[in-house]
Image (cartoon, helix red, strand yellow):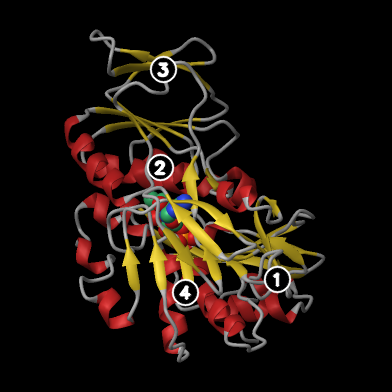
């Protein structure tokens, strides 16, 4: 077994294989120099200085314990499917019986003049987070471009570090595309109440150098406004790293296309994590999510598939965020047909609630905000596909299980 990519999905694939009794050779080739680690703390606890590195990086003896040949700092450059081996940038060749692609995703860049100035950063790796923490401490004025999850989490960390923070959002509200207007407004209010200058329907025209001509000094908006900035954090989404798979002739769309068993168009090659666009049996659609939970669990399906068990991946998408005093979990999938109703159970103004997105009276997705231990119940509602009376759903005295 050879795994390309030493992130969470790659590491969990190795662990799951061992948990299920796989006794063969197991190699992970990863281009980062760090051992496998989880990324969520990079924009939350670790950036805030409250989480220790050890709490989310696989420990020093992990590879030995798992009997994994973990080769860090190795970039895989090509897959030869006919003779079943991969080549790496150091000239090495590694043969495989099964190959697992776990190359994850990478941040989108801003395509504007000045995007490569010093002081313009993005956040994906542990190194990025280390650097960002130092920069936040030294940057009074921070501009975050993008109002998605990572942008908002960085904004919250920057406020905690005492920075003046502006968040620039292209649409009507941050997270508008994910949550719709009803719940996006809650996140907008949260940030404004915590002193973030949130600007919507705004685009960046250019990043302008400061006096030294090297470091960023300001952000120029499309209406000509110049926002002074000591640091610009670009958080405008990520894209799956499909180049290897594409060059190897595997079927690729938005990610590497897999069946429900995570097999690509070549059954000897599987894909996991952010990279995998999975034919989801319950949702009846191809689903690619950039979420920790998928990276955590895809490996179990890979292990089952490789060891000959029939266990399709049908977990519902799930993710979480922490921003200021708000913690939330979201589960489900709305899909291209959209929703026609939002039901709020709890107190929206106090930001203590469970929100549900429905279509034709059926729950598609749910989000609990500062309310805990309800994800299983929300998922049961989604899986039931039952038409739910919205009045009862909104009534906190009616148990979700009812
Ligand atoms: C800052 C941040 C915060 C996040 N917070 C949350 C959160 O709160 N909740 C949530 O659900 N999700 C969150 N996520 C998303 C979550 O971390 C990802 O979904 C998860 O990391 C995906 O894991 P992965 O292993 O598929 O990919 P990755 O973690 O991207 O790992 C892929 C690895 O493969 C390596 N690689 C790529 N190409 C090659 C190659 N050719 N050769 C060798 N190695 C290669 C990459 O360098 C990388 O190390 C966050 C992500 C980030 C960046």
Instruction: Report the residue that reaches farthest toward the right.
Output: 360
Q: Are marks 3 and 1 in contact (CB under 8 Å)?
A: no
Quadrant for residue 142, please give it: top left
Q: Residue at x 76, y 70 (%)?
A: 362
Ligand 1 - quadrant of the structure image: bottom left
Of badges 4 and 3, nearer the viewer stands 4
The C terminus lies in quadrant: bottom right
Disc 1/disc 4 C-alpha distance (Å): 43 Å
Task: First in sequence, mark 1 or 4: give its number.
Answer: 4
Q: Secondary structure at mark 1?
A: helix
- Quarter of the image for residue 235 reads top left
Give the mark nearest the N terminus, 4 or 3.
4
Q: Mark 2 to mark 1: distance in Å?
A: 30 Å
Q: Which mark is residue 13?
A: 4
In terms of depth relative to the viewer, which is nearer, 373 or 12? 12
- The residues tagged by marks 2 and 4 sit, at their Cα atoms, a distance apart of 37 Å
Q: Is residue 193 above or below residue 248?
A: above
| N-term mark: 3 or 1 | 3
Decide: is 30 above or below 217. below
Q: Identify residue for label 2.
A: 191
Residue at 77% over, 56% down: 340
Measuring 74% from the left and 57% from the top, which residue is drawn there? Answer: 339
Most foreground residue, 116 or 189: 116
Q: Label 1 belongs to which residue? A: 391
Q: Depth-wise, is mark 1 or mark 4 nearer the camera?
A: 4
**Residue 330 visible to an observer of this rendering:** no
Percent across and percent down for residue 174 are 52, 41
Q: Earlier in the sequence, mark 2 or mark 3?
A: 3
Please state the horizontal and vertical placement of residue 328, each as a whole percent of the image.
45, 62
Q: Could you tell me how far apart the alpha carbons at marks 2 and 3 are, in whole angstroms? A: 27 Å
Residue 85 rendering spot, x and y as whole percentages: 53, 63
């Amino acid at each position: 077994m050879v795994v390309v990519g030493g992130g969470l999905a790659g590491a969990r694939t190795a662990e799951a294989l061992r948990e299920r009794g796989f006794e063969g050779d197991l190699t992970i080739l990863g281009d980062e120099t760090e051992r496998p680690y989880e990324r969520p703390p990079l924009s939350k606890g670790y950036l805030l200085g409250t989480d220790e590195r050890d709490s989310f990086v696989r420990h020093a003896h992990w590879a030995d314990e798992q009997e994994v040949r973990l080769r860090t700092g190795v970039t895989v450059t090509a897959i030869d499917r006919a003779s079943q081996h991969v080549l790496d940038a150091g000239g090495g060749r590694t043969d495989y019986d099964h190959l697992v692609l776990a190359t994850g995703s990478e941040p989108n860049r801003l395509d504007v003049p000045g995007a490569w100035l010093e002081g313009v950063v993005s956040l994906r790796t542990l190194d990025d987070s280390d650097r960002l923490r130092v920069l936040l401490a030294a940057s009074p004025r921070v501009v975050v471009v993008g109002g998605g999850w990572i942008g908002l989490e960085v904004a919250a960390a920057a406020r905690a570090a005492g920075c003046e923070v502006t968040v620039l959002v292209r649409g009507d509200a941050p997270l508008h595309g994910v949550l719709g207007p009803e719940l996006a407004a809650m996140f907008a209010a949260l940030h404004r109440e915590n002193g973030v200058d949130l600007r919507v329907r705004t685009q960046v025209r250019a990043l302008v150098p400061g006096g030294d001509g090297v470091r960023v000094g300001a952000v120029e908006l499309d209406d000509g406004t110049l926002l002074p900035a000591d640091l610009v954090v670009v958080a405008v989404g990520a894209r799956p790293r499909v180049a290897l798979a594409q060059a190897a002739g595997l079927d690729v769309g938005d990610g590497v296309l897999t069946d429900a068993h995570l097999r690509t168009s070549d059954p000897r090659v599987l894909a996991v994590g952010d990279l995998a666009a999975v034919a989801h049996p319950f949702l009846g659609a191809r689903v690619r999510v950039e979420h920790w939970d998928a990276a955590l669990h895809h490996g179990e399906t890979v292990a089952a598939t490789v060891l000959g068990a029939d266990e399709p991946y049908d977990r519902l998408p799930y993710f979480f965020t922490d921003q200021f005093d708000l913690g939330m979990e979201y589960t489900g999938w709305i899909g291209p047909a959209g929703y026609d109703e939002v039901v709020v159970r709890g107190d929206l103004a106090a930001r203590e609630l469970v929100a549900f997105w429905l279509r034709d009276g059926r729950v598609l997705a749910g989000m609990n905000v500062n309310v805990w231990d309800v994800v299983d119940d929300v998922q049961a509602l989604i899986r039931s596909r039952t038409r739910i009376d919205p009045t009862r759903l909104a009534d906190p005295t009616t148990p979700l299980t009812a």
